[in-house]
Image (spheres, grey):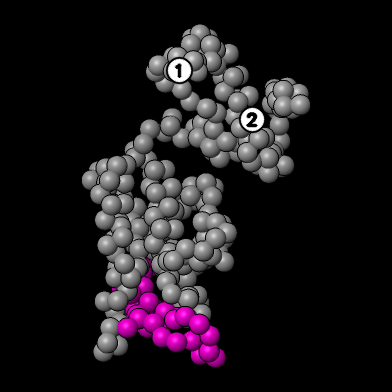
Amino acid sequence: MRITICTLFPEMFEGFINTSIIARAIKQDKVVIDLVNIRDFTLDKHNHVDDTPFGGGRGMVMMCQPVLDALASVRTKNSKVYLMAAGGKTFNQTTAREYAKEDHIIFICGHYEGLDARIYDEVDGLLSIGDYILTGGELASMVVSDAIIRLLEGVIMEESHLDESFENGLLEYPHYTKPVDYKGKTVPEVLLSGHHENIRKYRLKESLRNTYQNRPDLLEKRVFSKEELKFLEEIKEDLK
């Protein structure tokens, strides 16, 4: 897979592409990440990539020419292009799985007050990571890229995905490791029992509890099994 990021600040990505799982995925040729400096494509003699908005108003707007020329330099017939924008479709785990199937994704990172609206006509979609404003699209593009790359075959073990938050529509159950007793706080006995079925039930119930307490909206459209309904009733009773 190839991910291309069009940005005014490629230096922001140095830590991202040279650290941890992402660095390993690149080294193992699971993904190629290209950084395209939009400023390299400006025709302005002063190297400007932005200008004042027509009609007045505060802030500066990124110009069409450098952004679209940068895009044209890397776009192919197999590319999917997404503009990181607060007003875009909210990115989630389902979207991450869809994007992980693509051959080539291009992210355009906006800055300043925004981008010339004519740029929007040249992309496949607008993408947001949440209902808040960042100073630019770089951090958002890293978040999305990370979520996609870790889903690529061979980047991490497939088993590691199965019980993660959002993969089955629920938040993940709590994890514990050594020591068994830390300043009086102990690991639940069931996890030490070696009884796989009891451990499965415990984890499912705690996953439901975590979701019910922290993200009840995820349960609104869920089709529950009989076991889950039983656990959910027990959870509600526990919380009274």
Residue at image x 44%, y 58%? 140
The amino acid beneath tag 2 is Leu
C-beta proximity under 8 Å, tags 2 and 1: no
The amino acid beneath tag 1 is Lys
Q: Secondary structure at mark 2?
A: helix
Q: Residues within 10 Å of mark 2 (few under 14, many from 20)?
A: many
Mark drawn on residue 208: 2
Q: Secondary structure at mark 1?
A: loop
Residue toward you, 131 or 94: 131
Image quadrant assignment for residue 203: top right
Q: Quadrant of the C terminus?
A: top right
Residue toward you, 196 or 59: 59
- Is residue 61 one of those drawn in magenta? yes
Residue at image x 39%, y 55%? 142
Residue toward you, 199 or 100: 199
Q: Which residue is mark 1?
A: 183
- Is residue 64 one of those drawn in magenta? yes
Residue at image x 59%, y 29%? 207
Q: Is residue 29 visible?
A: no
- Horizontal placement of 106 versus 175: left or right? left
Q: Nearer the viewer, mark 2 or mark 1?
A: 1
| Residue sitting at the far front | 183
Q: Position of residue 163 (x, y in %)?
A: 51, 31
Image quadrant assignment for residue 139: bottom left
Which span of residues is magenta-colored? 48-77
Q: Is residue 201 visible?
A: yes
Whole-angstrom CA distance, mark 2 to mark 1, is 27 Å
Residue at image x 57%, y 59%? 131
